[in-house]
Image (spheres, rainbow, N blue to C red):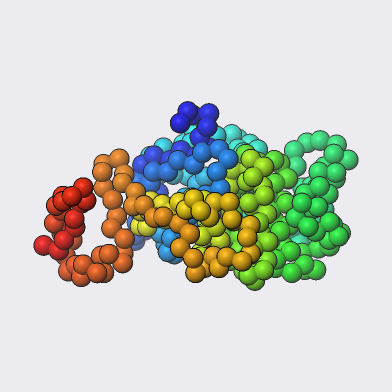
Amino acid sequence: MSEEEVMVQADGLVKIYKSKETEVLALQGLDLTVNKGELTALIGNSGSGKSTFLNMIGGLDRPSAGSLKVDGKNLFTMSEKELVLYKRETVGFVWQNNGRNMLPYLTVLENIMLPMNLSSTRHKKDKALGLLEMVGLANKKYSKMNMLSGGEQQRIAIAIALANSPKLLLADEPTGSVDTKTADYIFDLFTELNNNGQTILIVTHDTALSKKVKRVVAIRDGKISSERVLKEEFVDRIGESNIDWRAEETQDEYVVMDKAHRLQIPQELVDELSLDDNKVKLSFKDGSIIITKP
């Protein structure tokens, strides 16, 4: 894969949060490549490091060590001025907390126009109206945040995040506080955007949403532990409403091996082994690696 085709390249990414009493290792050598045009979901338990990783890609937090490039831009070497331009031109962010997405004293139309690059007011208004049409809320252009439902606010947040035509759209739990019907609508919107070439990275706990994504990356203890890939028979059926996405096994799961040939054993297999220390025996038989309790 050439550099021109890569949107996110993280190598050995480390993030340490320090206080007077403690150090917290949020990322422990994370490696991940996201190509341009991909729709990728990040999953993991609370504290696994997924939101920390998203914040770094969004330019909201600085890495402690390793390497992180987005659209060829090195986030380690950026000056503060370059970082401001990066956040304005390269990434768009949809927050779970709608209060961070919109200014309550502005109308919906004004909120969408606010982050747009310098251009004529007419151009901004036309583009904002087009984005409102895309998210199905053209009739809400003069509403303020307190006049909108949670689902409407989240759809407006997507329009705001797209206002500057970002190369990478980031979304932190975009369906976390909406009902199932609205969650489906939001996911269909992300799918449509992705089909039109938008690169999207989503952090989610939504099982049904993650099962519809072609590539799901699981983060555990600050590292990539596994990847799930949509089975071929489901790739062309994402839009079908007669599939119970929560119940169907739609993806194949692969454990990810890092550059030092280390991998994380899935928790359910660790539980089945009933390990009482940190050692296992490995053997090779009939083309398979066998892991046994010592």
The percent coordinates of residue 14 (x first, y second) are: 38, 46
Of 11 and 266, nearer the camera is: 266
- Residue 277 in view of the camera: yes
Residue lying at 68% horizontally and 61% vertically, measured from the top left: 185
- Residue 97 in view of the camera: no
256 displayed left or right of 101: left
134 displayed left or right of 28: right
21 displayed left or right of 80: left
Of 163 and 197, nearer the camera is: 197
The percent coordinates of residue 59 (x first, y second) are: 55, 44
194 to 136, vertically: above or below? above
Residue that extends furthest to the left in the rendered view of this protein: 294
Residue lying at 54% horizontally and 65% vertically, measured from the top left: 245
The percent coordinates of residue 26 (x first, y second) are: 39, 54
Q: Quadrant of the N terminus?
A: top left
Residue lying at 79% horizontally and 53% vertically, measured from the top left: 132
The percent coordinates of residue 214 (x first, y second) are: 51, 51
Q: In the rendered picture of this protein, how many numbered marks are placed on residues?
A: 0
Residue lying at 36% horizontally and 42% vertically, measured from the top left: 12
The quadrant in which residue 126 appears is top right
Residue that extends furthest to the right in the rendered view of this protein: 122
Q: Quadrant of the C terminus?
A: bottom left
Residue that extends furthest to the front in the rendered view of this protein: 233
Of 257 and 238, nearer the camera is: 238
